[in-house]
Amino acid sequence: MQRLYIATEKFDPSHGSGWEEYVEWSGLAQLTEVVTIDGILCPTALGDIKDSYWPHIVNEDYMLDFFVDLDFLLSELGDAHDLNVLGVIRRPLADVRSLAWGGFAFLGYDLMDKVVGNSALSNCGGFPDVFANSELSNVGLLDDFDRAVEIRDLLHRTYPEERHADCDLWAIFRRQGG
């Protein structure tokens, strides 16, 4: 179980009309913030990949924004006060909510398409035949591992031609403090 790190911009009510339009479009009225690795909703904090990143990032397709070295990521960010520094686990095989991960708190599970582009939970307009918007937490994630696995499997079976419904399960943790 590989622990990875990514820093993303926050998406919350401080975005004014953009936030209001998103909540209206998504129907996710319970949200106080969106926490996701969906780069459309929460763009990565670091732009272009620098040559110095290569020893510290995941060298796989669609994974170049993910770091294997937290200290290196933090050193590249400078002031991370207005960012979400996330610890993530791709495809956990069991519930990791109680995992002790120093300085990180478990937030929930996300379902990301295979190219780690869109969250099927918070950025596809919903899949009401598979899950209700009310199942998502106030940050747009699922709390229950078994339900997240069930939704992942149902999405793929129910919408086999929809690329955003072919998902990987991701556990999302957020760094606490500074």
Image: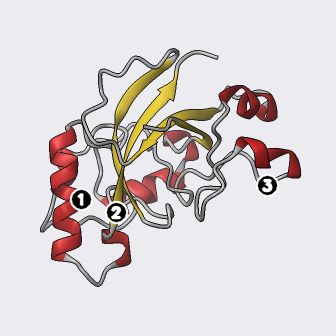
**In the foreground, 76 or 139:** 76
Count of numbered tags? 3
Left or right, 172 with respect to 53, comes to left
The Cα atoms of the two marked residues, 1 and 2, are separated by 6 Å
Residue 80 locus on image (x, y percent): 70, 29
**Regarding mark 3 in the picture, which secondary structure is present there?**
loop
Tell me if label 1 and label 2 are in contact, CB under 8 Å: yes
The residue at which mark 2 appears reads as 167
The Cα atoms of the two marked residues, 1 and 3, are separated by 31 Å
**In the foreground, 44 or 161:** 161
**In the foreground, 121 or 1:** 1
User: Badge 3: how crowded within 10 Å, few (<14), some, or many (20+)?
Assistant: few
**Regarding mark 1 in the picture, which secondary structure is present there?**
helix
- Vertically, is 52 above or below 176? below
Residue 114 locus on image (x, y percent): 43, 66
Left or right, 49 with respect to 140, comes to right
